[in-house]
Amino acid sequence: MEKTQRAHGRSVGDKDFVRVRRALPADLDDLIALENASFSSDRLSPRQWKHHLGSDRASILLVERQGRTGAAAVLFFRKGSPLARLYSLAVAAELRGRGIGEVLLEACEGEAAGCGCTQMRLEVRSDNLAAQRLYARRGYRLFASRPGYYEDGATALCYEKML
């Protein structure tokens, strides 16, 4: 899977200007801090973050706003598979509701398509209604649920989209 360094800027609500780019090893501390602030369980370890930052089967995209990491997403790929998996998408609490998650999700879809994938799948907590609305707006379709999927026993809803 060929990896290229891509970045693009975009204006979102309230005159915000955000830049989406591929995460670098230097971003490790910011990625860990964002995930710890966003999720109370089911987190990647620092070792996993380091591994994924250097992996050709993963892509970590982040959103910068005013020079700070405001959101990040982790995508996984399988060699020879047309399917990409959105493993995680986190937006800093103070930036939620401004369209930044949608900008990041769009960039993830572009990244997956650029890697030759024709479909993306993801899991989302059944109690995360804001994320479910985002995925529905972007054309994702619910195809399954997995009771007890998360560490705390919460159900995962499984979504997919043709790219």
Image (cartoon, rainbow, N blue to C red):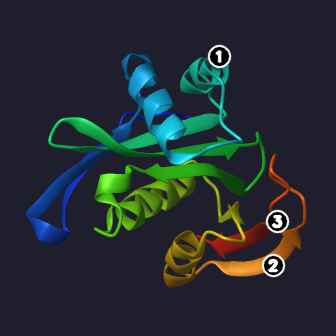
For the C terminus, the quadrant is: bottom right
Q: In the visual, does 79 lie left or right of 103? A: right
Look at mark 3 in the image and give the residue it sits on: 155
Q: CA distance from mark 2 to mark 3?
A: 14 Å
Instruction: Count residues near mark 3 (Cα–Cα under 10 Å), then give few for <14, some for 14-19, many for 20+.
Output: some
Type of amino acid under label 1: Arg
Q: Is residue 109 left or right of residue 96?
A: right
Residue topped by disc 2? 143
Image point (65%, 32%), residue name: 44
Question: Residue 51 vs residue 158: left or right?
Answer: left
Upstream in the sequence, badge 1 or badge 2? 1
Q: Is residue 101 left or right of residue 39?
A: left
How far apart, in angstroms, are the residues tagged by discs 1 and 3?
26 Å
Between marks 2 and 3 in the image, the one whose residue lies nearer the viewer: 3
State whether residue 6 appears in this view. Answer: no
Front residue of 115 and 107: 107
| Helix, strand or loop status at disc 2 | strand
Comes first in the chain, label 1 or label 3: 1
Q: Are marks 1 and 3 in contact (CB under 8 Å)?
A: no
Labels 1, 2: front one: 1
User: Residue 27: percent from the left, percent from the top?
Assistant: 38, 24
Q: Residue at x 35, y 62 (%)?
A: 96
Q: Position of residue 24 (x, y in %)?
A: 40, 24
Residue 47, which numbered label? Answer: 1
Residue type at mark 3: give it: Thr
Asked where in the image residue 156 lies, by quadrant, the reply is: bottom right
* The one of 144 and 82 positioned closer to us in this rendering: 144
Going 51% across and 73% down the picture, which residue do you hit? 130
Whether the residues at callouts 1 and 2 have beta carbons within 8 Å, the answer is no
The quadrant in which residue 141 appears is: bottom right
